[in-house]
Image (cartoon, rainbow, N blue to C red):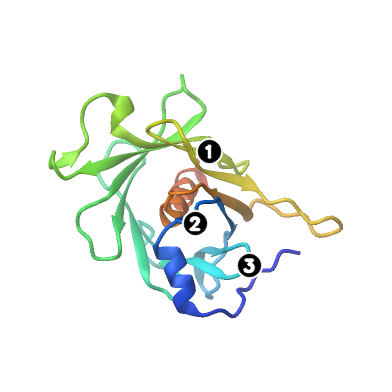
Amino acid sequence: MTKVYPNAARVSERQKASTDGNITGSEVVLTVWKKSLLLNCNGFTVFDSKGNLVFRVDNYIAGNKNQILLMDDAGTPLLTIRHKRLSFGDNWLVYEGEGSVKPLFTAKKHVNILNSKCLAHLLSYEEDHGGWKIGNKKKEVAYEIEGSYAQRCCAVYDNNRRKVAEIKRKEAVAGGVAFGGDVFRLIVQPDMDTALAMAFVILLDQMFGSGSSSR
């Protein structure tokens, strides 16, 4: 079976890897476990290829369902994801850290039945325009997510249609126990921020997870 608990490693080294993004020049493969390591919490636990803890999401079951905090292995907040209230459709805002008031992105669940492959897209916040980037639709979309989250088969494309991240089922080791949908792989391409890639997973889980649409 795949190792679930993290290896003992220096926290400072793992913190640097998670907060600097993917600057290795090669793809990074993370194992995502849809489970918090804390009791009475829902969330995610994310490991690198060596079994070291990289990211955590720990949401208390009785806590605020409209705000999700992505943390590194030491519990330092990296990104905050908040549900956009009083908006048409299923929209979320992504902020840097925990206390920021200016969003980095807004994420929108895709509802156009003419393009059933698209699950969601993210718009970036433009400082110069004082708001969400305007103009040609293809230019204003920073990232687009296609595929099926229910099947754990998704691809993330940037505004140049380059594939920057993928979600795939995790194959079971020969003779081992088969993995379900709660354990899967997140593959992040070079120059793509791994924390932002994990934010895509969180957003998809909110939009298409249990109790939501099955896409």
Q: Is residue 199 left or right of residue 28?
A: left
Q: Sequence order check: which comes first, mark 1 or mark 3?
A: 3
For mark 3, give the secondary structure: loop
Task: Please state which of residues 127 and 120 is positioned toward the viewer in this rendering.
Answer: 127
Question: Is residue 73 visible in this depiction of the protein?
Answer: no
Q: What is the CA distance from the residue labelled 2 to the residue labelled 3?
A: 15 Å
Disc 1 packing (10 Å; few <14; some 14–19; many ≥20): many
Residue 19 point in image, percent of width and height: 40, 64
Q: Which residue is mark 1?
A: 155
Question: Is residue 188 visible in this depiction of the protein?
Answer: yes
Residue at the image point whose x is 46% and y is 53% from the top: 202
Residue at the image point whose x is 62% and y is 62% from the top: 49
Q: Sequence order check: which comes first, mark 2 or mark 3?
A: 2
Residue 46 point in image, percent of width and height: 55, 63
Kindly identify which numbered label has been placed on residue 24: 2
Q: What is the CA distance from the residue labelled 1 to the residue labelled 3?
A: 24 Å
Task: Please state which of residues 201 and 19 is positioned toward the viewer in this rendering.
Answer: 19
Q: Which residue ends up furthest to the right in the rendered image?
A: 175
For mark 2, give the secondary structure: loop
Q: Which residue is mark 3?
A: 50
